[in-house]
Image (cartoon, helix red, strand yellow):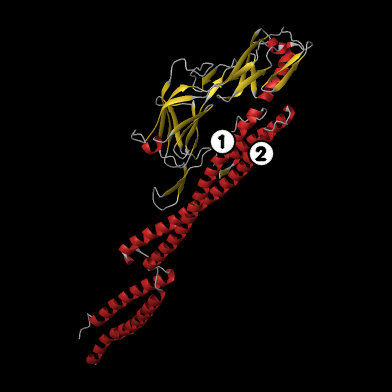
Amino acid sequence: MRINANIAAAGAAAALTRINREAGASAARLVSGRRINTAADDPSGLAVANLLSRQARVMAIARRNAMDGVSMTEITDGALDEITGMVQRARELAVRAANGANTTDDRQKIQAEIDQLLDEIDASVARTEFNGARLINGERSRFVAAVRGGSATDAIVPTFVDAEVPEGTLRFTLERAPVPARAVGVIGGDSVFPDGSFTINGVPVVVSASDSADDALTKLKEACLAAGVEVRSPDYPKQSQLILTSAWLGKNAKITLRPAGSAALAAFGLSAGEWNGADARVSGADYADAAGHTIDSFMNAATVTTDGERIGVLGADNRGVYFDLRTTADPRGVYSLADGTPVGDDGSLPFGPIPDMSVTVTGHGRLILQTGHEQFMETRADIPSVSADSLGMRNINVQTEEGAAAAITACDKALNKLSRVRGGIGAFANRLTFTEESLALSITNTEAALSRAADTDMAAETTNYARLSVISQAGIAVLAQANQRPQQLLQLLK
């Protein structure tokens, strides 16, 4: 027996220290509910828990993104429904205007309502947004760029692309620009007019010998406004050209002046007849992939359609790419492409055909939703523009029977486009709904895995803590006994 070294007490103290440390860790697990409270508790388990925690939290954000996407599609579909109703009303009015029993005044009133409908379509497009992001003005469409000779150009304006069209670049050569119908007369401040009348696109113009040149010109402008014709007299009141141009472009645009031999018509320097505009014309249309190879599945059955400034390259199912060739006119009615290229009165290009023009279409729309926990886990949608111009309705004029008939066709095409767009939006909404449900299930399963990896098994830990408490109490009692053993040596000294 030794006094200087109480081996039994030291052993009991070391064991008690270890038990108290384990009991403290157990208590921490019970209080926090977490099996891993420090990296030392389980280094590899901590790495797994952190990964699972990150996935669960980010997937919760992705689920919110998907729900935002559903909200966006609901707003979009609601706006498209209203626009569809307006187009249907415009078609009803066009059918009404096509009836030969209507007077010029009747058609003018019908046209006024159609103009209001078209303005409201554009207003709906402008105000349809989600959190400040415009939805149906073309910003979310598949079009990327319009190029001429390797540089961006204002002369080409992409308007619509169907979902079935593959990713690629439409390349073509412009042979002729679109132009309006054009008739030219003469007028001056000293022009004299007889009593008489004539019609322009069926709209009467009545002048009298008492009219001044200003009065007669005002009457002509009022009639032309109703007839869908623009009037220019750039040097008036000097004796100068009187230029009449149709309000829209293409072969279906026309100016009809009747009757032959009208003295009133001759007083404006005009003659009876019919003048038509010209459609744009392209050649060498080719649709190629990123490597420059022609996409045969699209081009083998493709047809090129032209309607004024609008050009369409359509596949076998009449689904395709549409774009406009934009032109501008100076005060004298001289046309040019929007990029400044001059255009002849008949649409000819004085400097020859323009090659290397193209429109690029991506494989997906520019509405991008982050619906996954990793980069590129995205859901994309294409929402083309549905403005009156994109739908091909901006130039509707029902003030003649021919114009009303053309308006019916234009409305039918617009309704077909709207149906395709709404169908795509509905499919996208359904996809997002399934995405949100899938993410909700994934979050639940990931959190369950995280709980198994990082949470405390309360039943087992309570049992363990009770065991450690009993051992700790026993250790304290043993340590107290061991500390008393050296005192027994004092009995030997008595």
Residue type at mark 1: give it.
Leu
Residue 268 sits above or below residue 96 on the image: above
**Along the line of sight, which residue is nearer the eye, 205 or 469?**
205
Residue 239 locus on image (x, y percent): 66, 7
Label 1 residue SS:
loop
Q: Residue furthest right?
A: 210
Quadrant location of the N terminus? Answer: bottom left
Mark 1, residue position: 391
Q: Would you say residue 288 is visible in this rendering?
A: yes
Residue 15 locus on image (x, y percent): 29, 78
Residue 98 sits above or below residue 338 on the image: below
Residue 355 sits above or below residue 85 on the image: above
Q: Residue at x 78, y 10 (%)?
A: 209
Residue 156 locus on image (x, y percent): 48, 28
Q: Specify the label residue 92 is tagged with.
A: 2
Q: Would you say residue 36 is visible in this rendering?
A: no
The alpha-carbon separation of the residues under discs 1 and 2 comes to 17 Å
Decide if residue 193 is on the left or right side of residue 171: right
The residue carrying pointer 2 sits among few (fewer than 14), some (14 to 19) or many (20 or more) residues within 10 Å by Cα, namely some
Decide if residue 41 is on the left or right side of residue 166: left
Residue type at mark 2: give it.
Glu
Q: Specify the label residue 291 is tagged with.
A: none
